[in-house]
């Protein structure tokens, strides 16, 4: 490793950016990647930032139990640095003296040399005494590190599966590829990966999927630039096939960016695709994705919930509404979601989801199908939205679904995180009478 302090300092900056400043981990880590020149440093920085954010509340409780006096609010960076040190000692197999010494050294680039003593003393105490199991408050929200409101909601929605969901949210997610079947077969792609010693396995029930044994930067894999595959979780790979696309159909992907499902639709059938997204910058990524894969669609940057501004009046035979949501099904890939979401978000998001559904329904041709999906596990954004819609609307029939993992609900289908080794996802398929 080129420099042992730098990746730790970058990881700390990312964690502080999320916890203190409410910023997105993806954005912070991309900036860190640009500053770190060594690939191993980048991976280490990423592993540290993910680890601390996955276990932040538990680590915070450890720090509180170990410190004789709490640190001042303005020194939150120092307590997060101690969390980083404890994470290395408790969860990573690295020599403890390096973990302590290099973590203490981060106080220098932090400009808080005075903190070296307290960081050192606290980490040494942790080394001597180990994990504090009596934290005073016994709570799964601390054990699994998530805010009380989110724990309470998951417990309420999924009482029997709650512990499994919480554990899966803190586990590492596998890297899955979706073969572009217009350019390659999965067997051909698997063989090309094997040539550079990347081991992958086909995935039962996901015909285009290959699971990589070890994650690798996609651009370093053979066939990426030629558009032979995309990176997409298994649960997301189940959405486009639910549209039962047929060649020539007019299809709307109403919330399309960055284009994973738009591309999947176009790989499944030669359809006339309209891909819409309200975020013009994100829509540019759909353009990039489609060009790389050799696919094309009409791209529109607009509010899907305001069709008067963009719809040409020609009905769609299929609509995909992959609605903006809390992302509570993808926490294992984005642990910052735990700390960025607020308890008021699900209600606000549900109001937006209901608006999009109501505004898009008139655009669907009679006999057409709309697939509603989210990467949320909260019923308020999923089953409740669809139940109310189906009950209020007299030209809709909800189609029964039978997916390989997860569970049928009265309205729709839910995969919880970790089921089938997938992200958490909800799907409902609505037919217009
Ligand atoms: C879950 S993401 C879509 C992911 C995408 N379907 C894929 O598979 O790559 C939700 C998207 O909805 C977009 N969005 C949010 N509100 C919207 C609106 N009112 N109209 C259109 N797009 C919207 C966001 O910009 C975001 O790109």
Image (cartoon, helix red, strand yellow):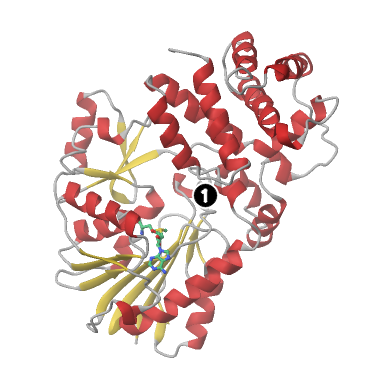
Circle 1 Cα neighbour tier, 10 Å, few/some/many (<14 / 14–19 / ≥20) = many
The residue wearing badge 1 is 417
- Report the quarter where the C terminus lies: bottom left
Q: Position of residue 212 (x, y in %)?
A: 34, 34
Q: Residue furthest bottom?
A: 394
181 w.r.t. 195: above or below: below
- Report the quarter where the N terminus lies: top left
Q: Position of residue 10 (x, y in %)?
A: 51, 27
Q: Is residue 21 left or right of residue 399?
A: right
Residue 411 appears anywhere in the view:
no
Residue sitting nearer the eye, 305 or 371? 305
Q: Is residue 420 left or right of residue 312?
A: right
Residue at 24% from the left image edge and 32% from the top image edge: 221
Residue 351 appears anywhere in the view:
yes
248 w.r.t. 315: above or below: above
106 w.r.t. 187: above or below: above
Residue sitting nearer the eye, 426 or 289? 289
Q: Is residue 20 left or right of residue 372?
A: right
Q: Position of residue 424 (x, y in %)?
A: 49, 53
14 w.r.t. 105: above or below: below
Q: Is residue 184 left or right of residue 361?
A: left
Query: Which quadrant would residue 62 be assigned to in this image?
Result: top right
Q: Is mark 1 within 8 Å of ligand 1?
A: no
Q: Position of residue 260 (x, y in %)?
A: 31, 53
Identify the secondary structure beneath mark 1. Answer: loop
If the picture is divided into quarters, which one holds ligand 1?
A: bottom left
Label tally: 1
């Amino acid at each position: 490793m080129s420099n042992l302090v730098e990746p730790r300092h970058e990881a700390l900056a990312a964690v502080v950016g999320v916890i203190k400043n409410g910023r997105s981990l993806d954005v912070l880590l991309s900036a860190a990647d640009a500053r770190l020149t060594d690939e191993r440093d980048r991976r280490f920085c990423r592993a540290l930032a993910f680890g601390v954010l996955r276990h932040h509340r538990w680590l915070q409780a450890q720090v509180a139990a170990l410190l004789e006096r709490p640190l001042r609010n303005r020194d939150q960076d120092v307590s997060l640095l101690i969390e980083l040190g404890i994470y290395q000692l408790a969860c990573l197999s690295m020599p403890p003296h390096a973990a302590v010494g290099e973590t203490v050294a981060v106080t220098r680039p932090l400009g808080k040399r005075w903190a070296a003593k307290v960081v050192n003393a606290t980490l040494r105490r942790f080394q001597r005494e180990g994990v504090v199991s009596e934290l005073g408050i016994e709570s799964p929200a601390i054990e699994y590190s998530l805010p009380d409101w989110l724990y309470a909601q998951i417990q309420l929605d999924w009482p029997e599966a709650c512990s499994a969901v919480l554990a899966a949210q803190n586990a590492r997610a596998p890297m899955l590829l979706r073969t572009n079947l217009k350019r390659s077969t999965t067997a051909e792609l698997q063989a090309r990966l094997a040539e550079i010693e990347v081991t992958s396995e086909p995935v039962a029930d996901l015909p285009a999927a290959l699971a990589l044994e070890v994650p690798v930067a996609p651009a370093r894999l053979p066939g990426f630039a030629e558009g032979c595959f995309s990176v997409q979780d298994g649960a997301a790979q189940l959405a486009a096939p639910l549209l039962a696309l047929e060649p020539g159909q007019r299809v709307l992907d109403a919330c399309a960016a960055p284009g994973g499902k738009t591309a999947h639709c176009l790989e499944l059938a030669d359809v006339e695709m309209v891909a819409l997204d309200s975020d013009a910058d994100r829509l540019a990524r759909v353009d990039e994705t489609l060009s790389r894969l050799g696919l094309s669609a009409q791209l529109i940057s607009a509010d899907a919930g305001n069709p008067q501004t963009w719809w040409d009046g020609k009905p769609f035979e299929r609509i995909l509404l992959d609605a903006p949501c809390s992302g509570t099904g993808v926490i294992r890939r984005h642990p910052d979601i735990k700390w960025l979401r607020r308890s008021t978000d699900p209600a606000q998001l549900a109001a937006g989801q209901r608006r999009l559904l109501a505004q898009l329904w008139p655009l669907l041709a009679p006999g057409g199908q709309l697939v509603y999906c989210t990467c949320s596990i909260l019923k308020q954004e999923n089953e409740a939205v669809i139940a109310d819609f189906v009950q209020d609307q007299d030209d809709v029939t909800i189609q029964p679904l039978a997916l390989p993992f997860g569970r049928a609900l009265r309205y729709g289908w839910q995969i919880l995180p970790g089921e089938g080794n997938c992200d958490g996802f909800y799907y409902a398929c609505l037919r217009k009478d």
